[in-house]
Amino acid sequence: MVDLIVKGGFVITADKNRRIIYKGAVAIEDGKIIAVDKSEKILKEYKAEIVIGGDDKIVMPGLICAHCHTHGRVAIGMPVELPVEFYDILSKWWWPMIEDQLTKDDVYILSRASCTEMVKRGITCIGDVMEAPNALPGALESEAKAFLEVGVRGVLAFEATERISKENGELGIQENLNFVKKWNKPGSLVKGLFCVHTVFSCSPEMLMKVRDLANKHKAGIHLHVEESVYEVNYCKKTYGKLPIEHLRDIGFLGPDVLAAQCVQTSDQEIKILKEYDVKVAHNPQSNMECGVGIAPVVKMLNEGITVSLGTDGLFPDMFETMRTTYLVHKGYLRDPTVLPAETVIEMATINGAKSLGIENETGSIEPGKRADLIVFSIPSPGPITADNLCSLVMYLGSGEYIDTVIVDGKIIVEKGRVKTVNEEEVRKKAFETYIDMLRRNKLEIKEESIKI
């Protein structure tokens, strides 16, 4: 007897053989995947009190957002006129009006709302970077509380930075250290990484202190790299080299480093990323929204670099992120053959797990891994086959079509509704926090508005 059997017309495994099983099923017990095979075989070998899914459903690994800011939902629709230059976006808006305003209560409320919206759309694991320098210490504990209440897997990190002061940077480092020590244990649904902001907001000494701590505690490092030309120009002027060259030369790079963005990365730096097995988190929608460009992801993948996907906290639907990735590089490179649908699905599943250092736990449907998977439908205009399935996921997949989400063997979303929290209460509290944030920033709240 097993706890749960999940059936699908097709099961996309994302395993090492990239199997797609027609009329497949997954047997789950004690939060783990016990077996995946043809439905007929699974149902013959295993019995379960609960059997879900069906021949009209698609089953695949839960989607992994490798780079996120769950507090970012408070930025969506904020009535401000964004500057043109990326550094000005940070210094005149994001830092003073969002990051510096956040309290521990804000962190909890906004993270809980983001997790609820994201898991509802099929995201079972979030690699989150919390940016709340005035909510130290304890910001990550507030965030972890939200993740655990919703039941989403999280790899959490606090963005340590010296942009305010060296002392604040030390507090950020200590926040990550405390979290890693407490939560990086077998079976924990949330775990920690070390994190720093960028080479222009962190001294070489700070970067290497974090590198040494990551080595000592066997935890990876998450950071932003080359999101804009500002960072490239700063590094050339300050250190006489490109950012990734600088990180290499101080001894920072390694296979446990997750570099988010990498929009401005040069060909020679791509070689360095490959040499040190650095992982990359691609965030195409926010890159375009900020006007910073299109990351050379196709070159990175051709070099054999592990590239995952992120929403950057602004877009809750990873199907949209996958679709954007699938399309934008074809248009940018004027080549419809780049980034096949199968590759994009890998980026959103097993590559996300590799980027966050949890590929032995999740990212694919294989015996022995934790049972993180999603069940959904596709409104296809014609027959769905193993040959066109991945393309249909790119063209038609949507978080709106999610039926069931399972995290660590537990059904978190059933028939499109989140079971673990009261969605309306979560949304209401987040809305109140949004209004409060507008007031703190002395932004106008118009009477002529719709309050949902």
Image (cartoon, rainbow, N blue to C red):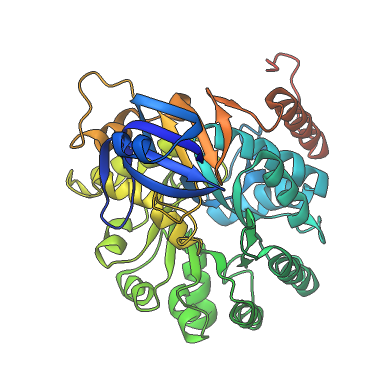
Counting from the top left corner in percent of width and height, residue 376 is at: 41, 29
Counting from the top left corner in percent of width and height, residue 218 is at: 59, 76
Counting from the top left corner in percent of width and height, residue 186 is at: 61, 63
| Side of 376 relative to 440 (left or right) | left
Is residue 391 positioned above or below 260 on the image? above
Residue drawn at (76%, 44%) of the image? 108
**Towards the viewer: 144 or 443:** 144
Residue drawn at (61%, 44%) of the image? 152
| Side of 77 relative to 276 (left or right) | right
Residue drawn at (29%, 40%) of the image? 327
Q: Quadrant of the C terminus?
A: top right
**Towards the viewer: 285 or 422:** 422
Residue drawn at (64%, 42%) of the image? 151
Is residue 385 positioned above or below 94 on the image? above
**Towards the viewer: 31 or 322:** 31
**Towards the viewer: 236 or 435:** 435
Quarter residue 75 falls in = top right
Residue 268 appears in the picture as rendered = yes
Residue 261 appears in the picture as rendered = no
